Image: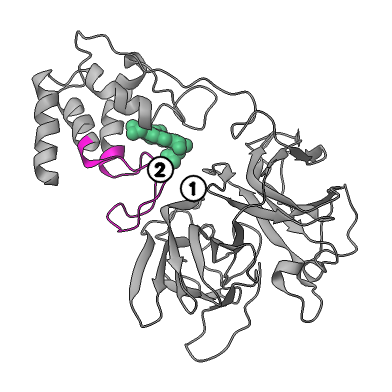
Amino acid sequence: MRFLWFGFVASAAFAFATDFASVAPVIEKNCAGCHQPGEIGPMALTSYAEVRPWAKAIRAAVLSRTMPPWHANPNASTHFANSRALSDADIALLTRWVDEGAPQGKRPAAIRLAAKSSGWTLGAKPDLIVSVPPHPIPAGGILSYVFVIRGTNFPEDKWIRGAEWKIDQRQVVHHMNAFIRPPGSSYLNGAPRDAAYVATPSERAARKPGERETDRRELLAGYEPGYRPAFWENGRAKLLRKGSDIVFEIHYTPNGKATTDASELGLYFASEPPRERVLTITPADADMAIPPGDPNYVTRMSATMKSPVELISLQPHMHLRGKAFQVRAVFPGGRTEALLDVPKYDFNWQTTYYLQSPLRLPEGARLEYVGVFDNSPNNKSNPDATKTVRWGDQSYEEMSIGFTEVAFPVTADPEVATLSGTTRPAGTKAPARNP
Ligand code: HEC
């Protein structure tokens, strides 16, 4: 069936001869959003004159599926709502056009650019804007994570249906995370408020004995290259308990020019209490030790459901030695389902994969994550193949995390999963730690 459709599209295009007018809609829809002035693509692709010199490179990029950037295996059974993958028909069309000499043709063709919003895209104006106080970033050096604690002052609980970053200095913001810190939490307890603060590793790890994870902190939203604003639809929202703080965790990476960053996080509140609460769980393997030169070091994490949830999104997180990442579900009874396969992980694209339709995971179902690392010199991104690499904040250290958004009835206990993560042989227990 796919074959027939394929042939049909190709011959339909052929009937017009493959001119720029035939490929312009594909470029408009799939490329121009990034390849225009002021966006992250290195060159503009918004007219025949701009596209023509890149024809050969475009052919190579779409055939190898390096462009548009989308790292999930397109043949997997899970479909993602935010997929950027080109269809086979579009790849065939672009390739044919280049093979025919990338002609302009006589038909008029234009690439229309979506109107730029100067501000927030999830809605006119967020209900709450939480700002990072202006923070100076030097021209060079390796900077520790910076933490900023901001209070919220609502007389009641709020439900957050959307969260969007307005990043001020994109070129030096490696990533930002915003956490919800409920009242009474041990997380960064004692750190100053409203000012940038470099917390020590032990301050960051400190916790009260027996404290529930959701009483300590909860990831609200992350920003990293390739991010899209988080919007929880269909009666789902994240809970901001009365008296909570927002804690920013920020990693600035200097790029040769001193600057000052003043980024913001915009929160949109639900007008009614949602049906389901959304929570990000973060199974991680924090006790890795990747030997020098090892081309295939495997880390494993899991999340076993204590009560039924719906899986909304998955986001692999590794650093420069990250090579591949997979997630599968193991259902009670043993049936397994492959959910995400990232065969060529790329640190520069930290993508959250939103499932087209949320997946029901019953009590006892287990998500299993495999993060594979390449610490050999064959890994072009490897900063140093002679070192044993352990968990750490910096890009030359490593992480292995499967950020996982789940939703469950607001009345359910939010401690929905038991997490574990270890590179040790099966059967030996390692403590599940939170990054
Ligand atoms: C989400 C943003 C994004 C989209 C969508 C996108 N690109 Fe890119 N493109 C980039 C970035 C960033 C780079 C440079 C870094 C890299 O290669 O990852 C790039 C690089 C390229 C290059 C290589 C340029 C060079 O210097 O060799 C080509 C060719 C290209 N893109 C073509 C396309 C085509 C064709 C499409 C659509 C089918 C597309 N891109 C869609 C962001 C994007």
Task: Answer above or below: position of 177 versus 284.
Answer: above
Residue in the picture at 71% in, 67% down: 214
Mark 2 is on which residue type?
A: Pro
Q: Residue 72 in magenta?
A: yes
Quadrant into which the C terminus falls: bottom right
What residue sits right under mark 2 in the picture?
69
Q: Are marks 1 and 2 in contact (CB under 8 Å)?
A: yes
Q: In which quarter of the view is residue 420 placed?
A: bottom right
Q: Nearer the viewer, residue 236 or 18?
A: 236
* Quadrant of the rendered image holding ligand 1: top left
Badge count: 2
Q: Residue 123 in magenta?
A: no
Q: Nearer the viewer, residue 395 or 324?
A: 324
Instruction: Answer whether residue 185 is visible to the viewer in this image.
Output: yes
Q: Residue 268, image x and y in percent?
A: 68, 41
Residue in the picture at 57% in, 44% down: 231
Mark 1 is on which residue type?
A: Trp
What residue sits right under mark 1 in the picture?
349
Side (left or right) of 42 relative to 145: left
Q: Check disc 2: other Cα within 10 Å, few if <14, some if 14-19, many if 20+.
A: some
Task: Answer above or below: position of 27 versus 435.
Answer: above
Residue reaching furthest bottom?
Answer: 427
Q: Residue 233, image x and y in percent?
A: 54, 46
Q: Residue 161, image x and y in percent?
A: 63, 46
| Ligand 1 lies under 8 Å from the Cβ of mark 2 | yes
Q: Residue 426, image x and y in percent?
A: 47, 88
Side (left or right) of 31 relative to 247: left
Task: Answer above or below: position of 367 versus 131.
Answer: below
- In the image, which residues are magenta? 61-89
Residue in the picture at 51% in, 32% down: 40
| Ligand 1 lies under 8 Å from the Cβ of mark 1 | yes
